[in-house]
Amino acid sequence: MAFEITNEMLVGSLMPAIVYWVYGGLYTILGYSCNNYRLHPKEDEDEKNFASKKTVIKGVLGQQFRQFIATNLLYMITRGNDAGASSGQSTSFFVIARQFIVAMFVFDTYQYFVHRYLHQNKFLYKHLHSKHHRLVVSYPFGAIYSHPIEGLLFDIIGGTMAIYISGMSPLTSAFFSSFCNMKSVDDHCGLMLPWNPFHIFFTNNTAYHDLHHQLYGGKYNFSQPFFSIWDKILGTYMPYSLEKREEGGFKLRPLKEFKN
Ligand SMILES: [Zn+2]
Ligand SMILES: [Zn+2]
């Protein structure tokens, strides 16, 4: 198999990373001017978190580099192999919509159970998942900050499964991965802006995931990145209310008693 990077491979492997920084950059700018919609005061990002922004940026760039390699390897392996994503299939709107829905369900289901297990198993939590939870006050570009093995487990394996099972073409998968990155940035942006389309379509939103990042929230709201179905079915859903903070912004309040 000759090693050749095509334009299709470059678009597919670079687009999700570019979308991540552009969308995350936009939210970072909004974060300075939209104090009334913040879930935490801006200064808490540095005071309450257990990782510096420099460490987070380095960690995210490392994860994106690994995703770049994995995506290109996947393209090389599947090229000429019709068992996986095929580029010759019909790409009508309905086909792509169906593929997105299947991929979202597969990705959500996989992530829920892996995520929950990473919290339940003390060894795995301590050595892997606690890294993502160093951000108690999450911010846009911290969305995929995690241990490299967790990044492999969650995003690379989970994303590959979703793309394979749904039968997406490489180009559709590039859009799907970019969409997942946007949703993940949105969930970690720390802003409950009105008319956010993600908040209209998904109950699994910024406040929902922010609750999971709180020191009290580790046994609830494991669902990510799209729907909250598994949390509701399996009793790990924590409803919340948003109250106005005196100094501006919202205060997130859980609405159920916590299990020990
Ligand atoms: Zn978690
Ligand atoms: Zn998170």
Image (cartoon, rainbow, N blue to C red):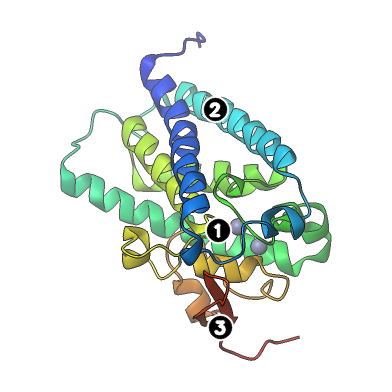
Residue drawn at (47%, 10%) of the image: 4
Which class describes the residues within 10 Å of circle 1: few (<14), some (14-19), or many (20+)?
many
Q: Is residue 11 above or below residue 138?
A: above
Distance from Cα at disc 1 to Cα at disc 2? 20 Å
**Badge 3 amino acid:** Gly
Q: Is residue 177 above or below residue 249?
A: above
Cβ of mark 2 under 8 A from ligand 2:
no
Question: Label 3 to label 1, Cα distance in Å?
Answer: 16 Å
Q: Amino acid at mark 2?
A: Phe
* Percent x, y of residue 77: 49, 24
**Residue ranking furthest to the front:** 247
- Circle 2 packing at 10 Å, graded few (<14), some (14-19), many (20+), is many
Question: Mark 3 falls on what kind of element?
Answer: loop
Question: Which is closer to the viewer, label 1 or label 2?
Answer: 2
Q: Which mark is residue 235?
A: 3
Nearest the eye: 104 or 197: 197
Query: In the rendered structure, which disc, 1 or 2, sits on the residue that comes first in sequence?
Result: 2
Residue occupied by mark 1:
111
Asked if disc 3 and disc 1 are in contact, CB closer than 8 Å, the reply is: no
Q: Nearer the viewer, residue 186 or 258?
A: 186
**SS at badge 2:** helix
Q: Is mark 1 within 8 Å of ligand 1?
A: no
How much space separates mark 3 and mark 2, taking CA atoms? 36 Å
Mark 3 and 2 residues: CB-CB less than 8 Å, in contact?
no
Residue 84 in the image: state x and y as whole percent: 39, 35
User: In the image, residue 71 lies at what x, y percent?
Assistant: 51, 29
